[in-house]
Each structure stands twice: as structure tokens, then as C-alpha cells.
Amino acid sequence: MQKTQLLAVEAILGVLSGESLTARLNVVWGTHTTLTDSQRGHLQDLCFGTLRYLAELKAYAKIMAEKPIQDAQINALLWIALYQLLYTRNAAHTVVNEAVAAVEGLHRGWAKGLVNALLRRFERERSDLVLQVRSQEETRYSYPKWWIDRLRKDHPDCFAILLEEGNRHPPMTLRVNRRRLTQEAYLAELRAQHISATAIGDAGLLLDRPVPVARLPGFNRGWVSVQDYGAQLAPALLDLADGMRVCDACAAPGGKTAHLLESAKLAVTALDVDPSRLSRVSQTLDRLGLSARTLCADAANLLSWWDGSLFDRVLLDAPCSASGVVRRHPDSKWLRRDSDIAQFAQQQSRLLRTLWQVVTPGGKLLYVTCSLFSMENEAVISAFLAEQSDAVLAPPSPPLDAAGRLLPCASNDGFFYALLCKR
């Protein structure tokens, strides 16, 4: 435990300095290659859990300390240990003892007594401290105030539910490659491996419990992919047919690209501005036995990639705040700023206006975000329709609501879809 606590301190401080948790953990995996699967899982739980409840954990440490603790590493260690005491089944005495020992690993011997005293005080006064901290909205939900305010404005009837949902563990959902086998056939393969799942949608399987990818039958043979159900709606909404030319803008890491190709015989052009992320698209397609034309380019700069041939369908999975998938990326709560949302909206509008030019008359463009904020969703589409007389918004159909939203719940993450038809 002490080793994973120390590595978690490094990761948490990396996030608070502006680095994504994914990037920081990739550094840890590359540096500490001898970590066991159990240690890796424990480290991920410490990082994800601490970041989910960071505002609450900070509040406890602040209340208990007689004066502010200036040392960043000791602060991070306290937050991690408090997360363990509050939200895991680890024995309290083990958590405290290992955290005190970890102080030596941080070369902060002077703080051993402080860490020991604060954690033991938390155990003694837990009920009163929890009551005090959770009386404030920001610490009760553990989100920045601006995030809470936006959700309250955009979703007044359910904003509290959405905040709580964003702190839950996400579901694990699979997408069956229907070019290889049917949904029912793969469900039988899972049952043979004693993995319980439920069919969802045309190709999805919702697992009762997450399992390592290595346990999934036929994963390396391209039978199945891991993809949230909310992200699996694109092919059906686009109404694909064999022979269509399709542009998948902002395609990385390739889940939706692959799903398009699994749904029909298409000529797909997949774009992404990031070469390293674009390579993941190719890897995904190779594993599934699929192929597409991949281009490293900015979709908003037509001169850099477009040859003048129009597309029957365009999928714009636009860069966004990722507020609908925050339970998978809890670091985004602390990396994002309120001002970022307007910047995303500008970028989304620019991409939408540009890509509309490559849609053939009678064709369709599907605008997608994994955001819960209206400024990135309904507002972008409303402004676009006001300036494009040849664009018609198709009415949403279930499981989307009347606004085109799929809100996060036990079976899926949060998404927004808008299908635009060209006159």
C-alpha cells in the first residue's frame, strides 16, 4: 500500500500541475514496469477516487490542520489516505500506518507526527467532520462551483443527480463486431467464461461487473471492442448503406470509425489532428480486420486534406469539455476552467461550418459531443441552423430525449447528438 500511495502522490500532483491523469499514469507504467496487476489496480483506484472527491478531501485536511500545510506532497498524501478511510474497505489502522510510513518515502520525516495525528483525529471525529464538510455544495458534490452552476442552469430538474452520477464508477460496455459474429453469439461466449452481461442496443453488451480486457473472448481476434453504449448510437442515426462515402472527423481513438465500418461496406476517411492519436485509429482497425483512409489533418482546414469530393455522411465527434464522461476522467473537473467552455463552443462551430461544405446535397452530418453543457450542444446547433438555410435538424429518437441528449446513468455516459440533413 505504501508504494502505491507514494506513486499516487506523484500522479495527483501531476494532474494539479496541469497534466492529464492518463498521461501521468502512462509515465508511471513506463517507469515502474515491475508493478503487479494488483498494484496497478490499487494505484488507479487511489488516483481516480482521490480526484473524484478532491474538494471534499481537501476540506477535511484544511479543517483539521491548525495552520495551512504548505508542503504539496504531504497534502496529497493526506488526501489519498482520507479517500481510503472514507471510500474503501481498507482497515483504518493499515491506512494510517502505511501513510505515516510513506512520509519517510517522501523524505519528510518531520511530518510523520502530523500525518498520524490528523488521520487519527479524522477517525475519532468522522461523523462531525463529514456533517460539517458536506453542508457546503462544492464539497458535498466535489466539483468546482462553475461546473455546479452550469449544470444547475442547463439541467435544473436533475443537476444534483448528474453531479452524483459523475462520481460513480462507470459501467463497462462492449460492442460486438457484427462482421465477425452476432450479439447473441458473443453473449454465449461470455456465458461460457462465466461473465454475466445484458444485451443493450443493436450491438452492445453491458457487463454486470468490469473485467480485464484479457478475459474477453476473442478480443485480440477482433470479435469485440470496449465502448460505452452512449457512443454506439452514431451508425444507426446516420442511416448508413453500402457504398457510401463517409468522413469521420476527429476520429481518434477510432471506436466510432470502427463501428461505422462494422455497420456497412463504406469508404471511410478518418481524420485527426494528432499523429499519435491517429496511430491508435489504425491499430484499432487492424485488430478488427477493417480498413479506412486515415489522414493527419485539421478537419477545419479543408485545404490541408479535402480533395473536393463530397461525402454522403459526415460524423463530427467534436472536441468538448467531456463533462458527460467525467466519471471516466475525474481529472477533467480540476483541469477545466469555466472559460474553456466558450472556447470549445467556438471550435465546435468552426468545425461544423467547415465540414458542412463537404456534405453532398441530400446527405447528413451527425454532430456529437460527450458534454452536458448546453453552450457546447443546443447553442452550437441553434446558431448553425440560424445561418445555414440548407440545413434541417432531424427530430431526435429514443434513447435520446427531445433535445438530443442522453444523460449519464447506470448503463451509459452522457452524450449529445444532432443529425443535420442537407436540403
Image (spheres, grey):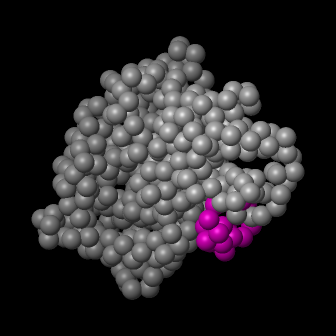
Residue 98, horizontal then vertical, whole percent: 63, 30
Q: Is residue 143 magenta?
A: yes
Quarter of the rendering containing residue 46 = top right
Front one among 293 and 262: 293
Residue 416's place in the image compared with 95, above or below, is below
Front one among 109 and 144: 109
What is the quadrant of the C terminus in the image?
bottom left
Is residue 45 shown to the viewer in this render? no
Residue 15, horizontal then vertical, whole percent: 47, 53
Residue name at image x 39 percent, y 86 percent: 387
Residue that lies at the very extreme toward the front in this rendered image:
110
Residue 190's place in the image compared with 198, above or below, is above
Left or right of 231: which side holds 311? Answer: left
Total numbered labels placed on residues in the image: 0
What is the quadrant of the N terminus in the image?
top right
Residue name at image x 57 percent, y 21 percent: 195
Front one among 38 and 279: 38
Quarter of the rendering containing residue 219 = top left
Residue that lies at the very extreme toward the right in this rendered image:
128
Instruction: Report the magenta residues as a range.
Output: 139-162
Left or right of 406: which side holds 27? Answer: left
Residue 103, horizontal then vertical, whole percent: 57, 37
Residue that lies at the very extreme toward the top in this rendered image:
192
Left or right of 135: which side holds 225? Answer: left
Residue name at image x 60 percent, y 43 percent: 110
Residue 395, horizontal then vertical, whole percent: 53, 67
Q: Main secondary structure of the magenta part?
A: helix
Is residue 53 shown to the viewer in this render? yes
Residue 393's place in the image compared with 15, above or below, is below
